[in-house]
Image (cartoon, grey):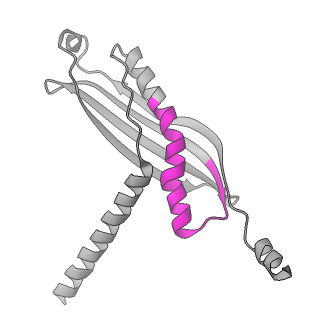
């Protein structure tokens, strides 16, 4: 019993808390206006997502930045381009290695995404276009896909090195 208590005291308590959410960068361009408004609105929408994280101090604070770039084209003409860097500061302690990377790559972006989605929708409407409600994103699946891709690439590079020796 005393050994269990000692072991529990030695392990740092796991904490994950949002400290602040903010727009780090926001850009909206509509190069084909006003002519684009005369065309039938059936855009081809391309969405690119990216996340990055940095430890910002020794107290357990991390900045996570979710970058979303959206290009809407009508008949191969760019109707609008939106790019947002939705960022947040998260306090994370008691997690290491893969668990820490998973939180930074899934939990934090899941918190940031609704803020980015609302900003994108609002800026598109203010630009004269219909609302653009992005579908929810499964960051857990994206994280797993990135891990699998990295493992496949490492395996392929290892095989390539073995073949060249």
Using residue 155 as the reference point, say whether residue 16 is left or right of it.
right
Q: Identify the residue shown where x is 45% and y is 21%.
A: 122
Farthest-out residue, right: 2
Q: How many marks?
A: 0
Q: Among all residues in the image, which is located at the extreme left?
A: 75
Q: Is residue 149 above or below residue 115?
A: below
Q: Residue at x 50, y 59 (%)?
A: 102
Left or right for 91, reference 74: right
Image quadrant in which you'd find residue 76:
top left
Residue 106 % position (x, y): 49, 52
The location of residue 139, given as percent across then percent down, is 43, 49
Residue 117: percent from left, percent from top: 45, 31
Most prominent secondary structure in the magenta stretch?
helix
* Residue 111 image offset from top left, x and y in percent: 54, 42
Question: Horizontal placement of 35 versus 147: left or right?
Answer: left
Q: Nearer the viewer, residue 117 or 50?
A: 117
Asked if residue 140 is positioned above or below residue 48 in the image, the reply reads: below
**Which quadrant, please, contains the C terminus?**
bottom left
Magenta segment range?
90-117
Between residue 15 and residue 64, name the one nearer to us.
15
Residue 96 lies within the magenta run: yes
Q: Is residue 90 above or below residue 2?
A: above
The residue sitting at the bottom extreme is 165
Q: Is residue 53 magenta?
A: no
- Snapshot quadrant of residue 69: top left
Q: Is residue 28 left or right of residue 96?
A: left
Question: In the picture, which quadrant includes the N terminus?
Answer: bottom right
């Amino acid at each position: 019993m005393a050994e269990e208590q000692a072991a529990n005291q030695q392990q740092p308590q796991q904490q994950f808390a949002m400290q602040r959410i903010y727009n780090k960068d926001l850009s909206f361009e509509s190069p084909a206006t006003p002519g684009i408004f005369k065309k039938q609105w059936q855009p081809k929408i391309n969405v690119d997502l990216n996340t990055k994280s940095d430890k910002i101090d020794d107290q357990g604070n991390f900045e996570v930045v979710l970058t979303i770039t959206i290009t809407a084209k009508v008949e191969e003409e760019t109707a609008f381009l939106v790019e947002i860097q939705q960022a947040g500061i998260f306090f994370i302690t008691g997690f290491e290695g893969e668990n820490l990377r998973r939180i930074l790559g899934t939990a934090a972006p899941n918190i940031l995404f609704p803020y980015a989605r609302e900003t994108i929708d609002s800026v598109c409407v203010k630009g004269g276009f219909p609302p653009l409600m992005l579908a929810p994103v499964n960051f857990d699946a994206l994280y797993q896909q990135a891990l699998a891709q990295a493992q496949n690439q490492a395996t392929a590079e290892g095989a390539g090195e073995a073949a060249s020796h």
